[in-house]
Every structure is written in C-alpha cells, then in structure tokens.
Amino acid sequence: MKKINWKVRFKNKTWVVAMIAAIFFVGQAVLYVFGVTWDYNELLQRVITVVTGVFAVWGLIIDPTTEGGTDSIQARNYKEPRKDEE
C-alpha cells in the first residue's frame, strides 16, 4: 500500500466514482450477511446495481496515473507491463 500514489488516484474522478461503486457493493454484501436489506423497490435496486457496475468496470479499465480514460502515449507502446527499477 505504501507504493501506491493515493493522492494522484483521488484526483482522478473516474477512479473515485469506481471506488465509491466498489464500496457500495461491498457494503451491500456485508449488510446482507447480517440480514439487513435496504427498503427500496426491485427496479431501483437493479438500476443502481447496473449503474454502479458500469462505473466499477470503467474504474478497472482506466489508468489512474493519466487524466481521462486513455493511457499515456508511452503506456500504449508497451508490449508487457513495465517493471519499476529499484
């Protein structure tokens, strides 16, 4: 966890939305284990699940070190993941 630049990640709006969606899914699952369900109708629940799922998937696709949803020019030229020199 120390080798992750959290400040940069939190500046990326897409990553933040994906993190909120992931927290929503985990929270909902934990509450369900303890028998707590939210009181909203089935359609609303499905819509929320689909929307947050889309954001979660988008958050997995993006590169949090660049602005927007695309990779940097340098990253697009990689043939395999870059390994940092230590």
Image (tube, rainbow, N blue to C red):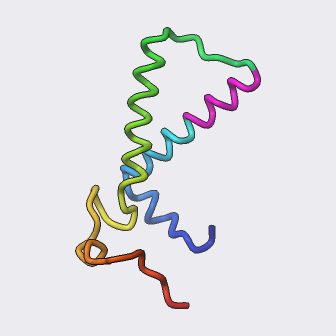
Q: Quadrant of residue 37?
A: top right
Residue 29 magenta-highlighted: yes
Q: What residue is rendered at 54% in x and 69% in y?
A: 4
Q: Furthest residue to the right? A: 34
Q: Is residue 43 above or below residue 29?
A: above
* Total numbered badges shown on the rendered structure: 0
**Farthest front residue in view:** 79
Stretch of the chain drawn in magenta: 25-34
Classify residue 48 by image quadrant.
top left
Residue 9 against residue 78 in the figure, above or below: above
Residue 28 screen position, x and y as percent: 61, 28
Residue pictured at 43% horizontal, 15% vertical: 44
Q: Residue at x 40, y 62 (%)?
A: 64
Foreground residue among 81 and 51: 81
Q: Is residue 71 left or right of residue 59?
A: left
Measuring from the top left, give residue 86's x and y in whole percent. Answer: 55, 90
Along the line of sight, which residue is nearer the eye, 19 or 53?
53
**34 or 12: nearer the viewer:** 34
* Residue closest to the far bottom: 86
Relative image position of residue 8 (x, y in whole percent): 44, 65
The overriding secondary structure of the stretch rendered in magenta is: helix
**Looking at the image, which residue is at 48% across and 38% down?**
21
Compared across the picture, whether 79 is left or right of 15 comes to: left
Residue farthest toward the left in the current orientation of the protein: 73
Q: Position of residue 62 (x, y in %)?
A: 35, 57
Q: Quadrant of the N terminus?
A: bottom right
